[in-house]
Image (spheres, rainbow, N blue to C red):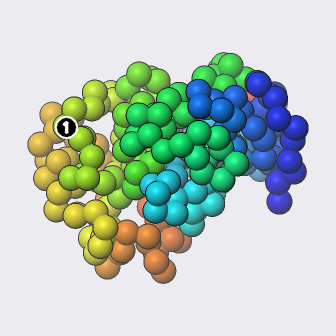
Amino acid sequence: MTTAQPASPSPAFPETASALTLAGPAGNLEVVVELPEGAGRAGTAIVCHPHPLHGGTLHNKVVTMLSRALAELGLAVVRFNFRGVGASQGSYDEGRGETDDLRAVAAWVRQQRPHDAVWLAGFSFGSYVALRAAKSLDVAQLIQIAPPVGRWAFESIDLPDCPWLVVQGEADEVVDPNAVYQWIEGLERPPQLIRMPDTSHYFHRRLMDLRGAVKHAVQANLPPERLA
């Protein structure tokens, strides 16, 4: 259960799970912060949701399960609605403005938690946005779930140097799994790839498997425990 906080141009990072509002490049951005149990680790993960015009929000089940997995690993987790979704102001901008939204959230995280490693994660369209921003934000870990290769211009993106995980369902009915595999095979520094058999785009009946796969894959890259 989150508790709403008043809107502020740059609110303090909450000490309990909270909903809050940030000033974004196209107006206010709706944000939810989840915290790990105990002191946690010196890291904050930002998670991006799927396509705004196809029902994607910060409450998407894959997004919330991914956030849960990262919080269980000890990270603080920030989910937010892109412009034009939920209480976030503005309108859909084909990935460009949404990348600016992500950069604004990351700037707030770094202002409030300057010593934290910043991780980026995203599902579907959100994974495309996360990839677009990862290099310029110099993140410590990137996680892409079902990246929509073939639907967006992945070939023009400046790719990150950080540890990078891709999880792809082999029965994805929205994203062509073979397009994802071929894209990865053609990269000079390919990410770690986890193929999930019998798994649809939305990970129906496989959300717990997704949670376990992500937690296991990124375990070695976790930041140190936060000092009390």
Q: Position of residue 160 (x, y in %)?
A: 33, 29
- Neighbor class of circle 1 (other Cα within 10 Å; few <14, some 14-19, many 20+) is few
Q: Amino acid at mark 1?
A: Glu
For the residue pair 41 and 59, the one nearer the viewer reads as: 59
For the residue pair 227 and 90, the one nearer the viewer reads as: 90
Instruction: Classify mark 1: helix, strand or loop.
Output: helix
Up-down: is 98 above or below 66?
above
Q: Residue at x 87, y 41 (%)?
A: 5
For the residue pair 91 and 119, the one nearer the viewer reads as: 91
Is residue 182 visible in the rendered image? The answer is yes
Is residue 214 visible in the rendered image? The answer is no
Q: Residue at x 88, y 38 (%)?
A: 6
Task: Locate the N terminus and report the quarter of the image it occupies.
Answer: bottom right
Up-down: is 171 above or below 133?
below
Up-down: is 116 above or below 208?
above
Task: Locate the C terminus and report the quarter of the image it occupies.
Answer: top right
Residue assigned mark 1 = 155
Q: How many marks?
A: 1
In the image, taking residue 13 as reference, residue 28 lies left or right, namely left
For the residue pair 94 and 81, the one nearer the viewer reads as: 94
Which quadrant of the figure has residue 31? top right
Q: Position of residue 182 (x, y in %)?
A: 13, 53
Which quadrant of the figure has residue 129? top left
In the image, taking residue 180 as reference, residue 96 lies left or right, namely right
Q: Position of residue 205 (x, y in %)?
A: 48, 80
Q: Residue at x 57, y 66 (%)?
A: 61
